[in-house]
Structures are given as structure tokens and as C-alpha cells.
Image (cartoon, coloured by chain):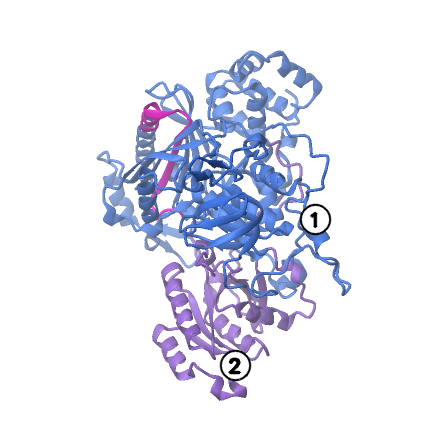
Chain colours: A blue, B purple
Amino acid sequence: MSYVTEPRRPSMVDRRPSMAERRPSMANGRKPSVIPQLAGIEKPISPQTPETCDVLICGTGLVESILAAALAWQGSNVLHVDSNPYYGDTCATLTIDQLKDWVHSVNQHTPGFQGFSKALLYIPRPQDLVSRDYGIDLTPRVVFARSDLMSLLTKSRVHMYLEFQSLSNFHTFENDSFGKLQTSKEDIFTDQSLSLATKRHLMKFLKFIFEYDSLDNLALVESYKDKSIQDFLQDRFKLDGPQINELVYSLGLSASPDISIPEGLSRIRRYLVSFNVLGQFPVLFSKYGGPGEVSQGFCRSAAVAGSTYKLNCALQSFDPKTKLAKFSDGTSAHVTEKVVCSPSQAPPHASYVPEMKYEITRLITVVKKSCREWMAENETAAIVVFPTASLSTNNKYPVQVLIMGAGTGTCPVNQCVWYLSTIQKGEVARKDLEAALLKLEDSILRESEDGFDVSLDPEDIIVKPDGATVINSVKLGKSFKDFVPKEKLQYLFKLCFTQHTAVPPFGVVSSSLFDTSAEKPTTDGSGVIPDSTVIYSNMPSTEISYDGVVTEAKLLYEKIVGSDDDFFDVDFENEDEDNDTLTDVAAGDEDAIIDDDEEEHSKAFKDEMDFDL
Amino acid sequence: MSAPINTEEPRFAQFKLVLLGESAVGKVLHRFVKDSFDDFRESTIGAAFLTQTILLDHNTTVKFEIWDTAGQERYKSLAPMYYRNANCALVVFDLTKQESLEKAKSWIKELQRQANSDIVIALTGNKLDLVQEDEGAREVSEDEARAYANELGLLYFEVSAKTGQEIKESFKSIAEKLPIEEKVNPRQGRRSRNVDLSRPNTNDQQACGC
């Protein structure tokens, strides 16, 4: 993804000294630490709301949380508040009860819920749902193994608060069935459904993608400047519809057919270079919830570095003259530098909330089926994409679906959460999503009837003394019978809503959006405007991956600090290796490993592509 | 990994321990970790959480991954992540302040609401040094606190964060209550695999082109 970087400010005068510069160097011979004193350990925690802070951040969405952590580790005194009783704000992971309240607030236009509209919730048997068994994401996302967020998670150590699982199955809906994408050389060669010519063309394209940067290839792309990516793939690589759809909508996860060739190619490349970085899969997701969970991790990191956290605390007003921020709980704080606020948490009577002209329509449902048929072995999630014009509604935009099974920690066993979304607008969008939902339902019923999808309890599996497992045969026989009548899919929960954003599809938020330098009136006839100098962050983008999130946090950071040079400029030593000599005895027993074929993984995908056509 | 179970083979198990209670909690933690590491470096703890390893018996090693609240408890703003999969909790109160026991009780309620039902909770009275010096300073009687702990099935300790007295012992008692066998030999059957992000070359800075 490319964005235009502003020329760096020539003067660094208003740049805050970095943490290392501000702290007197350590006297006792240790190397100077960039680590601030730790809340609660080295410095006593004050029981009062801080009366002053450098930066006030309102909203604990992912971008704001990354920003808070970056500022805190840089040495800023951050006060981070959220009007909600939970972390995550517009990208929260919620229980069923929390979602009920959320829907109510959205439809009541409660302050703090701008950015969402038209929420419809359907729970046929409320008594069957245990609220806290569910973690429903407002904006689910997957993270590419090679991406800026992945680097930041490990660098900041925030990954240690989280658990990640792999996702390898990307299905494309075509001719009324789901095709699974072939992305390795072996898969392409062994796929019976592909003709020899198609195989050759696909391989040629994959090779091209890896050499995309060469001058010849760039010139080639340039010569197709006015063409669509679909035309390019067809004309140049002789690929046909199904392959093009797989490449653009599944590998590329493009939310729109209108995509430039360089953008489309970089999205396909993004998938391919992520393959085999951490294992034989392109993307991962965090367990127990997506961005809502990752937000909590960054907030914790910020808190460790000294930030103050206050949930249930809404910004009421900010006076640009006195620099006093007032909150809904009656407290106030003097902000010495900047106020950053999520549009969803804008103060009452705000005048400068950025216009949000883009929409995402989401349909989230919980079904009573494991949906294992769609997932790779040892995995608990999958992606399904309905390309443009593949549905009965002749959908203009693709419908993207994230399938999260029980193993993701977000729903009970033998259930599954389906997240459908499209960037289509209004009623058309809802019809597209319903059409896709019907296809998903048909498909899972058919596939699970063909197979041996027996719902087994742990007691049904008997482990023999030699370690072999045997499945309770009574249950097996019974389920064969159950397969005869066509069952109906049970929906336990269904939620539809529209989300608004200022970020165009494929775009990374532009830096100008955060511009507060333009003179804005600070008062009007009725008094002080509460947000004339507030920097607004953005609602989550339409992107189904985490791409763009770190960029946005960096842009905001630069607005505040003056440069992003010391964005997360921390160097944590590896405590496990340095400190825990005792544990070496039992190395390898860590809970979180867990890939067997290390050798295979070290082999980059690129090497696999070195062959003659 | 299906190695045969051999009782003489070293056993290693890791558990998540969360700290709750009055603000001296942090000091208890500091003491506990400092106790065994002379060259303990503060820079290592900023990143995530403290770890402390204790030898339970000649072949059993228990590693505690210790999470402190980082101050997020002050405005009732602890994230669900804090309680998630916590195996044990140390709820600390001040033996010289009656109201701190009430606060501890509300934390225990919160744990029962948010944490796994099998969590091992240790109610821990701090400032043992003060009440040993002057019994008059004690506001919470041992009988009262112990009775409450027994009623709810909690462990009970009295410690001094200042001197380190009884701290090691209390961690050891917690370790003894933990399901070590289960951790050493995890359950059979299909399990989804977590990916260890720190395993491959994480210094790869070229990231994606975004």
C-alpha cells in the first residue's frame, strides 16, 4: 500500500526530546535505559486523576491504543479515556450483553456512538446464549505474517499478551461452489481442475509478482496504465475469470473491483510474501477477539509505561484557550500538548468531526455448526470471498467473509461466527449480504452432510492404552441416520449494521485529515466550540487486514511529536533468555510453539518459485 | 510430543499469576523477583510481565508469569485480557488497615466473576513486619481474615513486602496447589495450534510495502 509522505518538517524545534534525552543518564554504569519508571513498582501510583497530561486520547480503538503506547514509551504523559465501559471503542470485541447495549446506543444516536448506524439485532432464543461465551468483533481483521503490525507486535512485546493462530484456507465462491485457492507450486501442479495451460500461466504470473520491482516489469505495468487489473491479468497472462477472481478477491482481498494495477499487484504480493514467514500460511488472527483484543494489549503496554487509563469517562469539552478538558464524571485535566479523539467519542456539540463518506455494511451471525469443513487441519478459521457478480443480486462489490470457529475462543464448541461485509451502500448492501449468507448456509449444509461431521464430545473419544483414539461407535451410527433428513441451519444470533469511515477503500488515511493547523473558529454565537483544536483519529477502514493501522498511528504520532523517528524506539531485552537460567532445563516445553517442520518453513516461498517454465 | 511419562524426568510448568489489591502489590512483586536475582534488570520488565521460576522439588520447576495491573485498576479499567487464563491470583491487603480487606474482598468477587472458575486465589495480608513490631498496629485479625479465606476456599498468607518475609513461601504454596500434571502432559485430542511470533526471524524490518 502506498501513500504519499509529506516532506519531513525541516525544523525539529518543537519536537519533544526523546525519552533517552530527557532522562539523566544512569550513574551506576548500566547502559542508559530508555525504559521509564514502571507504574506501581518503581514509582507510587497516585490515586487521583492526573490534573495535567501531555496528551489526552479519547477512545481506546486500535489506532488510538497503538498511539498511546508509542507516546508513553517515548516519554509523554498520556491520559487515555473511553466513554465506554470496555476497551476497543469502534473495534471492540463484545459479549452478547454488551452488543445488546451497543445496538441500543447506536440506534438512539447516543453521544459516543457516531460512526455507526442502522443496527439490527436478532436473537431467536436468548435463553440459549450465555453472554460471556462470545467475543464478537465489531471490525474483525486478519494480520499478514509479513506486515508492519506484525513487526510492531514483536518489537513492542505486545505479542506476549496475545495468542495468535494461523489461517490458511481462502475460499472463492464460483459457479455455486467454493474453490480453495492454490498458492504453492505443488498445489497448482496437482490440482486436477486446472488445465496444463492454465497451470503454466499461473506459474508465470506468480514468478512475475516476485520480480515485480524490475524495470522491465514496471514498464510493462505502466503500459497498461489505463486498463483494469482484470484486463491486465487476462491480456498479459492469459488467465481466465476464475483465476483472476481468486487472485484479485481472495489472495488480494480487494474490497472493490475498481482497483489500480499496482495496487492490485501489491495486494497479491502481500499474500505471497507472507506465506512461509511464520509457517505455511499467509495470515494470522488473535485468539479471543481481533482488534478489540490487540487494543487491550497496546493499552496495557501504554499503562506499563505510565499512561493513565479511565473507562466510562467521556470528553465533554476542550477549551483551546485554557487547555482544560472536561469529562462526564465531573473531573477535568489540563492538557499541555494535544487532544486526540476518535470520531465516535467526539464531545457534545462538536463541529469538526471529519466527514465520513464511505460505508461498510456488516452482517455478523453465530450458527450452530462447527464449519470445520471449511478450515484447514488444526485450524479454526477460514476466509470465504464472493467475487463481484457471483451472487443472485449481481453484486457490484465482493462480499468478504471471515469464519471463526470455536477454537478461536470467541464462541462455544460446535458453533461458528460468520462475519460478512461489503463496501456496497444502503439496502443493496444488505441484500448482497443476505444473498451471500444463503449461499454459505447451502454450502455448509451440503458439505457437512457429505462428510462425517459428527459432533463429538470429549467423552466420545476413547483413548486406548497404546495412545490410539477410538470414536464411540454408537454415536457414529446415530449420526449417519441424522444425516438423512436435510437439516436446517440454526442461527443463534444475527446482527447487521452500517459503519461509516473517512478512509477510502485501499487508501491509507491521508495525513491532511489530521491537520489542525488550519485556523478554525474556536467560538460561535453560542459559545466555545468544544473541539476546534482536537485532532480526530478515524473510524476503522474497510480493509479486512490490519494494514493501514500502524501507518495511521504513526501519522498521528508525527502530528504530536513532530517526527516519527522515535516511534516505538524501544529495545527490550529478552527476559526469558537473560534471566531464566533455570528454565533452560526444560526448553521447548513452552505452551505456545508449535510447528513441526522448521526446515520447511525456513525455506522461503520465493525459492520454490525458482524453476524453468 | 508424546514422550513416555517418566517420574524422574524434569517437569516444567508455566502459570499465569495476576496481582490485585492495594498499591503495595507492586512492591511485593519486586521483592519476590529481586529475591533470587541479584543482577535483576528493570529494563527487562517493561516489556510484558515479570517471570519468576521456582524449584518445587528436585525435578519440578514452576515458572510464574506475573502480571501486575500497571495501574489500570485505579479507575476500574482492567481489561478482560488481564484475567484471561489466569491460573492464580494474589490479592493483597494491608494488615494495618481494615478497609483494605474490604477492598480485597471486592477484588475476589471480581475474580470470581471474570476469571476461570478453577483459579487459585491467595488472600495475602501485607506489612507483617509492622504488626510483629507492634501488635497494636494490626487492624485485621488473622482469625477473621483466615475464616473468610477458608469459607471461600482461598489460600491465606501474611507477608512483609518490606523484608521479604514469607513471600517465597507463599509463592511455593500457590505452586503446590496448581495443576502441574495437567500442564506437563496437556490433554489429548485435536487442539488448535498457537503460532509463536518470536520464533522466526523477527528482525525482518522490510515489512510489507504498506
Q: Quadrant of residue A358?
A: top left
Mark 2: secondary structure: helix
Q: Which residue is pictured at 54% across the width and 20% down the height?
A: A199
Classify mark 1: helix, strand or loop.
loop
- Which amino acid lies under the numbered mark 1 shown in the image of this protein? Pro
Q: Report which residue position mark 2 lands on.
A: B128
A70 left or right of A486 in image: right
Q: Is residue A106 above or below residue B103?
A: above
Q: Can residue B194 be seen in this view?
A: no
Q: Which of marks 2 and 1 is in front?
A: 1
Amino acid type assigned to the residue bearing label 2 in the image: Leu
Query: Measured from the top left, where is residue A239 in percent x and y?
Result: 52, 16
From this view, report whether residue B94 is shown above or below residue A162: below
| Residue occupying the point 23% across, 44% down | A125
Subunit ID for the residue under disc 2:
B
Mark 1 — on which chain does it sit?
A
Q: Mark 1 points at which residue?
A: A17
Q: Nearer the viewer, residue A29 or A267?
A: A29
Please tell me which residue lies in front, B140 or B55. B140
Q: Please tell me whether residue B171 belongs to the stretch shown in magenta.
A: no
Q: Residue at x 70, y 48 (%)?
A: A17
Q: Residues within 10 Å of mark 1 (few under 14, many from 20)?
A: some
Residue A23 coordinates in the image, percent (x, y): 70, 56
> Count the marks: how many?
2
- Give the extent of the magenta segment: A410-434
How many residues crowd mark 2 within 10 Å: few (<14), some (14–19), many (20+)?
many
In the current view of this chain or complex, which residue is farthest to the front?
A: A525
